Amino acid sequence: MANKSAGNDYERANVLAVMEENVEEIEELLVNMPSVFPDYLALLFASASEGGGIAAYEVLQLSAMVGGGGGEGGGRCIEALSKVVCNGNLENSIRAGCLKCMSELGIPATYLRDKGEVTRGESGDMDIASLSKLYTSNLNSLVNTACNSRFVLDVGQAAASLIKNFGSTDEAVELGLKIMEHLMNFIIRLMVHATENYAKLRLSLTEQSPTVVPLAILPFIENVLSTPAGLLGPVFQRRLLFAMQSLAILTYKVKTVRGIVGGVHEENLGKIVRLIGEGRLWKHPELLAALFKLHINIEGGHGPNWSKVHSRVSSMLLGEHERLVSFRGGGVIFNRCVKHNADGVPCNRASRAFNAFCPVFGEIGAVRESGGGKGKKTKNRKRKKKRMKKKKKKGGDRGYEGQESKEGGVEEEEKLEEEEEKEKEKEKELEGGESKEEMEADEGEEEVGEYDEEGKFEPNSDSDDTANFPVVDISTLQLDELDDLFFEGTGLDVGRGPPPAKFMCSLSGEIMHEPVQDPFCDEPRYYDKTSLVQKGEEEDDPYWPRTKERIDVDKVLKMVVDKRIVDEIRIWKERM
């Protein structure tokens, strides 16, 4: 974030000095003249960063001085930044710089610059609790800005006009590419870090994607893929990665966009392979993961020949994956993206194209453990159909002819449920899982003891609550050692290996962003709020998977997110 040149550091120091001298004036502008402040902001900090516009560090300084270190000042600054970005009368370099600043404010690392020093004066450094509060508040403000019905669209349209305009100079086209790059990075970072308002963000992007994708994203990709072979440096690689990740995000469960992207998907993939080199795509694991997810999200292709396109593309991608895993340690980054969703790009596991990539995602066949797949839905439909047939034969539960009494109908329902339970147990045994009886036989009080040198287990004679535990001195331990100590025995893997099962949504099979508990289930069972909302909107008769109660989308949106699981997921992600 900090500029490398001494000149820019000197300019930044002057800007900070000006801010500290004019805190009262700035605060008055923020509170009383919101329409004037964006222009003032743009002019005051025009030289503060490399791309023009205000830098993230200055925003933190400003929000700390105006809001006293809380989130109020940060929210006002972010609102002002968004107005600068959307103001077509300002220079495009300033707009690009302010959009880059908004993107930087969406990651935790920004708030730990200079060991967390974001305030000046007698108070010194901010403590971690204040930093977390400030980050959460600013992140929510950024999500609200992205959910504005015109923000993403207006910025994308402004960038597209610079990229596609035949009268634009090379400098103007480059500014348009920068604006699009920062916009896509902004969306990706919010998708990775947003938790409280994730469902709201996904819904907003779904509504804006049919316009943004053909208007801005596809022209951006076309321009990037026309880069000469001699200029394929880090900038090209970064822009190509952002483009593929953004496209995968915006095509997730959006039918209108699938058709637009599916028509040019194979052609664009061919251009990418020609630019990077035949058989060299595996050297870019994050890009490869984004291409896998994009191909799945667009259902493998579009039109009557989609199956042929799917066959060719999947064969090529799987070939690159084989080269990647054959390289020592080459699959670590890729697996984090596809199995643990570290890149924040969602993947539609119910897609018709997913089965071809089941081994890549660590799943077997069409029947998947984590739910959300076609195999599990097909089984549920068959059970429901079988149950309804038996009900009709017996007269149903509404007093049809053939039903002797209400009690008889209840007994019949109980018998049907018992039969379903037996079917599930048989399926579980065939899949290699434990049956209900085996699990109950394994239950019991765990013995406390230790293994001797010969490997024999010796139970402790004194295993009650008064046992003496070793005293651990944590004063000299580092952060990683403290994590290992605090989370030992809790079942939380602190980011080493696959995520715990309780972090996964039972509908989508992905890590939850907004975990909510089934209110009708006696035992704790969690689902991602976004998955429930999508299920409620897509199905004619949506119901909770376990309890079969009807899903009310409005009530789901108002449900309280389980903060404890959110915190555990956040810790796990930070330790990856």
Image: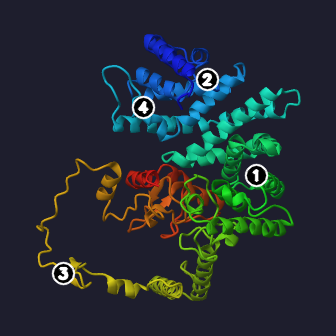
The residue closer to the viewer here, 547 or 388, is: 547
Considering only order in the chain, which callout, 3 or 4, is on the residue closer to the N terminus? 4
Is the residue marked by circle 2 packed among few (<14), some (14-19), or many (20+) residues within 10 Å?
A: many
The kind of residue tagged 3 is: Pro
Residue 161 in the image: above or below residue 406? above
Task: Say which residue label 2 marks.
Answer: 53
Residue 310 in the image: above or below residue 196? below
- Mark in front: 1 vs 4: 4
Spatial separation of the CA atoms under disc 1 and disc 3: 62 Å
Is the residue marked by circle 4 packed among few (<14), some (14-19), or many (20+) residues within 10 Å?
A: few
Considering only order in the chain, which callout, 3 or 1, is on the residue closer to the N terminus? 1
List x then y, in percent, for residue 550.
Answer: 53, 63
The kind of residue tagged 1 is: Val
Task: Say which residue label 3 marks.
Answer: 459
The kind of residue tagged 2 is: Gly
Residue 31 visible in image: no
Spatial separation of the CA atoms under disc 1 and disc 2: 33 Å
Please state if 128 lies on the left or on the right of 55 as rendered: left
Residue occupying image coordinates x 20% and y 56%: 472
Q: For the N terminus, which image quadrant? A: top right
Please state if 450 lies on the left or on the right of 24 as rendered: left
Please state if 441 lies on the left or on the right of 136 as rendered: left
- Mark in front: 1 vs 3: 3
Q: Tell me the tag on residue 257.
A: 1
Residue at disc 4, secondary structure = loop
Considering only order in the chain, which callout, 4 or 1, is on the residue closer to the N terminus? 4
Considering only order in the chain, which callout, 2 or 1, is on the residue closer to the N terminus? 2
Residue 484 in the image: above or below residue 35? below
List x then y, in percent, for residue 290.
Answer: 67, 55
Task: Say which residue label 4 marks.
Answer: 114
Is the residue marked by circle 3 packed among few (<14), some (14-19), or many (20+) residues within 10 Å?
A: few
